[in-house]
Amino acid sequence: MDIIDEQTLVAVADLICGDGTVYYRRAADLVTFFRRAGWNEVGEYDGDSRKSWTVAHLLCRRTEPDAIEQVLKRLVDPREYQQDRESAEEVFRQLNLLLQVENLHVELDANLRPAIRPGRMATDPAPLDISRQKLQYSVDEVVTDQKLVPILDQRIAEIDKCRATGCYLAAMILLGSLVELLLLDAAENRPIPDEIWNESEAKAERVRPAKTADKLSLHSLIYVAHRLKWIDTDAYRIASVLREFRNLVHPNLERKLTGRPPDEDTVDMYWPVFIGTFNDLGRSRPGGPGAEGGGPSTDPAGPWGRRRR
């Protein structure tokens, strides 16, 4: 990264201070912000105006591109905003607007870690590129088996290509496989009580156990994930429908399909199923924010006891 113009850094200082926004930073917050960015030598706030203090520190190291890059990346790091996703997205958008004149842009990788890239951010991004910004957790926080991570990345890229080239059925089949990948990893690494297989609802749904988690059908994986509160009801119900599209990989089932085959709207409609499943699994992961109380339901009919009316 080249040296950034002074006026751009002054504008960046405004964004860091956050005056008039929900991500407003107090004087003490500014000090900790720079330290979290890796500027460990930053001293305590000296009583100057917040913006003047911030501008002074940025201009002092203007000729150190690596140091400035640290600040820019920290500014859009989702970890800086905790659960405030809207603020994180707004700062991301504002910083990219500021960096246009420098012919730079910032983007988030698969693990939601920022990177500064040359060139302006595309005004019309690839159809599914923005989906990563909706992920509330990093891939490492959700997927335990790291061998599955490159598979996940590859299939997301292939869904993007399928959608862009009109291969919508292939995209839907891949979408179903993505959800299966996430649920398989969860089933292999989270406890599944034996008693859930004998519940009346499990029998009614024709859900059957397997000797090992990797032998469970997608139908069973979806059941288990909702039964144990790994995923919410909305993701469960839509994932069950997505499973039917995934099964169209079998020509005989496609032959029996009634209605129009999947199109672009179908892909756009079901992409949030993957996002929702991913975020739910992040929330419910062992030790995560939603893990407490995530055990089996005490309702003898299971979590669907009141579903049919």
Image (cartoon, helix red, strand yellow):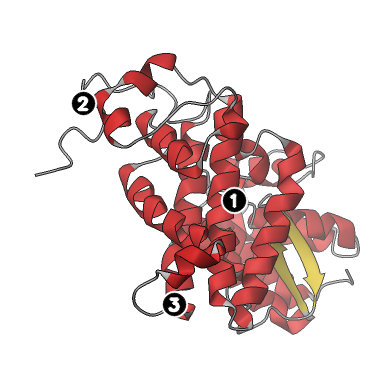
- The residue lying toward the viewer, choosing from 191 and 57, is 191
Amino acid type of the residue tagged 1 in the rendering: Pro
13 over 146 or under it: above or below? below
Q: Which mark is residue 261?
A: 3
Q: Quadrant of residue 86?
A: bottom left
Furthest-left residue in this view = 309
How many numbered discs sit on the rendered protein?
3
Asked if residue 83 can be seen in this view, the reply is no
Amino acid type of the residue tagged 3 in the rendering: Pro
Amino acid type of the residue tagged 2 in the rendering: Ala
| Element at label 2 | loop
Residue under the point 69% across and 38% down? 44
The C terminus, quarter of image: top left
The N terminus, quarter of image: bottom right
Residue 46 position, x and y percent, is 67, 44
Q: CA distance from mark 2 to mark 3?
A: 36 Å
Q: CA distance from mark 1 to mark 2?
A: 40 Å
283 over 20 or under it: above or below? above
Q: Nearer the viewer, mark 2 or mark 3?
A: 3
- The residue lying toward the viewer, choosing from 139 and 162, is 162
Asked if residue 147 can be seen in this view, the reply is yes
Q: Going from the N terminus, do you reach mark 1 or mark 2 first?
A: 1
Residue 111 position, x and y percent, is 69, 49
209 over 235 or under it: above or below? above
Q: Which mark is residue 78?
A: 1
Q: Which residue is mark 2?
A: 301
In this picture, residue 112 sits left or right of residue 275: right
Residue 49 position, x and y percent, is 59, 56
In this picture, residue 119 sits left or right of residue 254: right
Q: Going from the N terminus, do you reach mark 2 or mark 3 first?
A: 3
